[in-house]
Image (cartoon, helix red, strand yellow):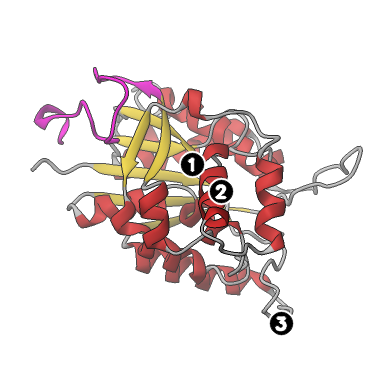
Amino acid sequence: MNTYRLLAIHAHPDDESSKGAATMARYIDEGHRVKVLTCTGGERGDLLNPSMDPVDDIVPVRKEEMAKAAHILGVEHEWLGYVDSGLPEGDPPPPLPEGCFALEDTEEVTQRVVRVIREFRPHVVITYDENGGYPHPDHIKVHAVSMRAWGAAADPDYHPELGAPWEIKKLYYTHGFIRQRFELLTDAMQHRGIELPGSILQFVNLTKKLPDLMNRVTTRVNVGEWFERRDDALRAHATQVDPQGQFFIGDPEFQREIWPTEEFELAETRVHTELPEDDLFAGLDSDNND
């Protein structure tokens, strides 16, 4: 079997475990190399686990959580080194804090990402869509930088000191908040007489206001066997995950029955592939395996 390299570019520690984690675990088990690039340290993340006591300094805690999650998934990991922008709230929202990732120069960030790409040489990159998956300023920044790096990493004239040029073969957006998925899971649980926490019902109502992303999905990867690993990685981010929250609607066996896939959108490709796909490496062959 050919083996490939996958790079997932994420904004914060925990994003890798809530968006495409089961897919990464599957590819690790199949012998591929997978690397997560985390752009910020999650410094402005709130404590979202109601069962935890307040944390005086969340930065080292989140670094430790990320290390645990990476170990559980089996991925390689690198920090890009920027500072979390936080999610501004209010109408109008307050200005972003000085020195945060979202305000960093896009070209300078792109150069750092290109260095990682040229060193790791991924065949496939996973990132966020133009809305960031949801409109967090750091997620939107990740999108802008990833799209710039798609072309820049392959350009021999673009900062040759960053390494030899490398052509990524395919670039995907990860779509983790599929409205229909949450609706199907909650409907199935209610049909079976299973009581749902209010936090989950509130979240599902919020997803009904989101755009319908299924019409953008090109690729559905069957990863039900890896849901336990995904959930364990999520729980490793204990400060960021409510054990009774939306990421744990039913046990893994129930989720396998109702919705056993993770969804992606093929945004860029340099190889021919037939849509819809069931594999992020579809269309790659031994000629791409260098």
- Mark 1 residue type: Arg
Q: Tell me if residue 208 can be seen.
A: yes
Q: Residues within 10 Å of mark 3 (few under 14, many from 20)?
A: few
Image quadrant occupied by the N terminus = top left
Instruction: Label 1, secondary structure: give it.
Output: helix
Residue 187: which numbered mark, if any?
2
Q: Is residue 268 left or right of residue 26?
A: right
Whole-percent x, y for residue 36 in the image: 41, 52
Whole-percent x, y for residue 133 in the image: 58, 38
Instruction: Label 2, secondary structure: give it.
Output: helix
- Mark 2 residue type: Asp
Among numbered discs 2 and 1, the one appearing first in the sequence: 1
Quote the CA–CA distance across marks 2 and 1. 44 Å
**Residue at image x 73%, y 52%?**
86
**Residues shaded magenta:** 267-290
Residue 170: which numbered mark, if any?
none
Which residue is tagged 1? 112
Quote the CA–CA distance across marks 3 and 2. 33 Å
**Residue at image x 40%, y 61%?**
252
- Mark 3 residue type: Asp
Comparing 18 with 159, the one in front is: 18
Quarter occupied by residue 129: top right
Residue 53: which numbered mark, if any?
3
